[in-house]
Image (cartoon, helix red, strand yellow):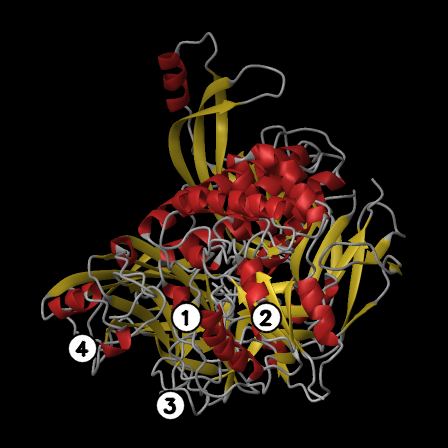
Amino acid sequence: MVSPKYAHVISHSHWDREWYLPFEKHRVRLVELMDTLIDLFEKDPEFRSFHLDGQTIVLDDYLQIRPEKKEIIARMVREGKLLIGPWYILQDEFLTSSEANIRNLLIGHEDASEYGSICKLGYFPDSFGNMGQAPQILLQAGMDTAVFGRGVKPVGFNNEARGDYESAFSEMNWQSPDGSTVLGILFANWYHNGMEVPTDPDEARVYWERKIRDVEKYASTPHLLFMNGCDHQPVQTNLSEALRTARSLYPDIEFIHSNFNEYVAQLKGKLPENLSTIRGELRSQRTNGWWTLVNTASARVYMKQANQKIQTFLEKVAEPIATLAKLTGHTYPKHLFTYAWKTLMQNHPHDSICGCSVDEVHREMMTRFDKSYQVAEQITAHSLKAITSMIDTETAFEPSAIPFTVFNTSGWNRTGVVNIDLEVKRIPLANRNRSKIVEELKELSLEGYVVKDRNGNVIDAKVEDLGVTFGYELPDDKFRQPYMARSVRVQFLAQDIPALGYTTFALYRDLSHIASSSSPLNKAIPCQMENEFLSVVIAEDGTYEITDKRSAKTYTGLGAYENTGDIGNEYIFKAPEGDIPITTRGLPAEIYVEEQTSYHTVIAIIHHWEIPASGDELLDQEIQEFVPFLERKAQRSKQTLPLTIKTRLTLEQGVPQLKIKTSLRNEAKDHRIRVLFPTDINSAVHYADSIFEVASRETVPAPEWTNPSNCQHQQAFVNVRNDQYGLTICNWGLNEYEVLRDGRGTIAITLLRAVQELGDWGVFQTPEAQCLGDHELEYAIIPHGDKHDAQQSFAAAYQAQIPWTTMQTPLQSGVLPAEHQFIRWSGDGLALTAVKMNGSSEDLIMRWFNMTDLPTQLHIEYVNGSHNTLYRSNVLEEEGEKLGMGSEIPIRPAEIVTIGGNPGL
């Protein structure tokens, strides 16, 4: 007896909302698709369902044009015809932060629930690699199955399977570092293997013979998956007829117009026991290395920097500050946060944030970044005003004081240099002579101003006169209030500011002190600087060595720049054949002390370099003629252009890291610039900040890897270490690194990659991807000792991402002290990722992950409020097991833990 077979045909369209066309042009096509789909559902009862690509933003985009269709859409969702969610957008998992991935899931669930049903499937059809913690995230969200198209099998741009699979079947177990396991379903023949099914019997026979054979090659059960659609694929309106034809040709196969709910349920009942288990990140590690698409991490670096700035500000400043304001009795603006996150996440689809679209797309993205940031800034300003209005400054400071408050919204106590602009005197413009106001403010003496802490101790500071400035207030109950002010910029070292808290300081006029400049403890030698942790010596060529005084380890030859040609595209870096990188090693540099105070030193290094101007003329021809990048013969131009690079090294007292800012004006094309950090550590693995994990990655790729480049993604840092010491390189929006196989364990951070085409399936010129113009790139070096010290360096890298938050504070009485910590927590190896309010309740939500492979314990205490309402939650922020305030909460290795609680306001 022949075993029955089941052909599950799932209709869908993978909707890249912007890519080779800008958003609005794709949206016109989306409206056409959705109109056709609605009409088809009404006319053809055999057309049972359509999978709307796992992202609810498609409905937002459609209903902005067709708002009258919302009830029809809702009815189709309730009837199970239209499957929506669980995501808001189909993100790039590695280029968006841990919390951005969670916000994507939360908002996708919220939006889908409004329509009555959520498709509980981890849908990753075209992610450029998959995060290792996805199974844990999915299980916490009530999903036990993931579907994905990349990361396990080798694919080319036409997505044809090549070589051996890491799993024998298209079905496998996928396990997170904490042990969480879901069923993984691979699109072994891509998500278009059932598109455009023929209705003609002769054509259908040829079609199905090939399609069935291809699917059976990898299927572990008789339930065969055929995806009826592809990128922007119009709905197949004659699919019912095509399936009737298939049934007549193959009576032994049951052809089902299916959906993922039905398919997965049937599949699970037939799975064999010998499924492979794949673990952690899926980055196409067992491939030839050319099609991982990892170099999208360095395409249009300016966008990655903008994304890091706004997503960090939202999740690590605006949300915590608004939460602390809520703890003092003020309103938490959930609606504004939803808008800000949605606006930001419209930049997070893989073809958007990856920088692999046409120029029009990325121009619009920069506007979205600005819009989201503006909302986050406004939320923060209102919340800061609410908190500071309650701080008692009269008790701590004298009547002549100008108080200001420094907030630390990170998860650890913090020390570092802070800058704040203060108004020494303000005069309203209403009914006053402007010129007289300006003259009065100009005559104000700024001599003798000093900074004091709440105990009256003078803190060494630099006070810079900003002159007369304009400002305004926007009161809640009256018209705008413009004014003129005399302002100063204050810079000083803030020490040990409490985590999730603040410390208040004050500016005084004290003629016994001279505050016009701070005096250095030791006059800097132009090529040397040090603090209590690090000693830095700069060589004539601008490279530098760092000695970690704690471990006595010296790292040499750091900070050389490397330049290489790039004849690839926005997706893939490809050096010209035989191209030899040039570096600044041996190139004399100008070196001088730019700034020095008792609390920090800044040394500038300037390189005057000559690099090739572009690729040669053959590159333009090869791109125009659609020559595949691996077949290109182009070289770099013989013509050169000057490239001046200014490097600023900053060492702060009390901070065990060297901060670096690289400034340059790029006028060259078709090239890549990296900065190099030899570690002289021989290690088979290294570590990189990834999504809710510090991922361990092999430094030497698999034997089948033929790509000379082995670049990888990073979030906040990359680390190379042995058992005694190591080096962590922290970055701000520089998402690509490579640990070189050069015998020195060199960490290479990509600063800029300039290319002229999109790549992929056609010829799409992208001149703005050459990234011409001015750039500022920031990163830091954090040496450390043993494994425990390495974890501290990771925490320092996470903290460094977060800007200081400050606000001038009235001289007033209040119920809050001059220094305060709202929430205390502790836990070895834990990293705090979220402090926010639950969107559907009044509960405070905090989230951590265990950076280590060891169990640990978490202790939490609300400084004010109830002491009995903590509970374990999950990534959907649902209430779970009750916990006692102050109890030790056990945390598994690599666990993502969310704790909710009502602070008893």
Q: Indicate which label's residue lies in the foreground, 3 or 4.
A: 4
Q: Disc 4 and disc 1: Cα gap in Å?
A: 21 Å
Per the image, label 2 sits on a secondary structure element best described as: helix
For the residues bearing labels 2 and 4, Cβ distance under 8 angstroms: no
Q: Earlier in the sequence, mark 3 or mark 2?
A: 2
Residue that carries the numbered disc 3 in the rendered image? 743
Say which quarter of the image contains residue 148.
Answer: bottom right
In the rendered image, is residue 610 in sight? no
For the residues bearing labels 3 and 2, Cβ distance under 8 angstroms: no
394 shown above or below 882: above
The one of 855 and 185 positioned closer to us in this rendering = 185
Q: Disc 3 and disc 1: Cα gap in Å?
A: 26 Å
Instruction: Report the disc number at residue 126.
Output: none
Q: What x and y, as percent, mark residue 76? A: 67, 46
Instruction: Report the disc number at residue 633.
Output: 4
Instruction: Report the disc number at residue 248.
Output: 2
Say which quarter of the image contains residue 523.
Answer: bottom left
Residue that carries the numbered disc 1 in the rendered image? 293
In the rendered image, is residue 415 in sight? yes
Q: Earlier in the sequence, mark 4 or mark 1?
A: 1
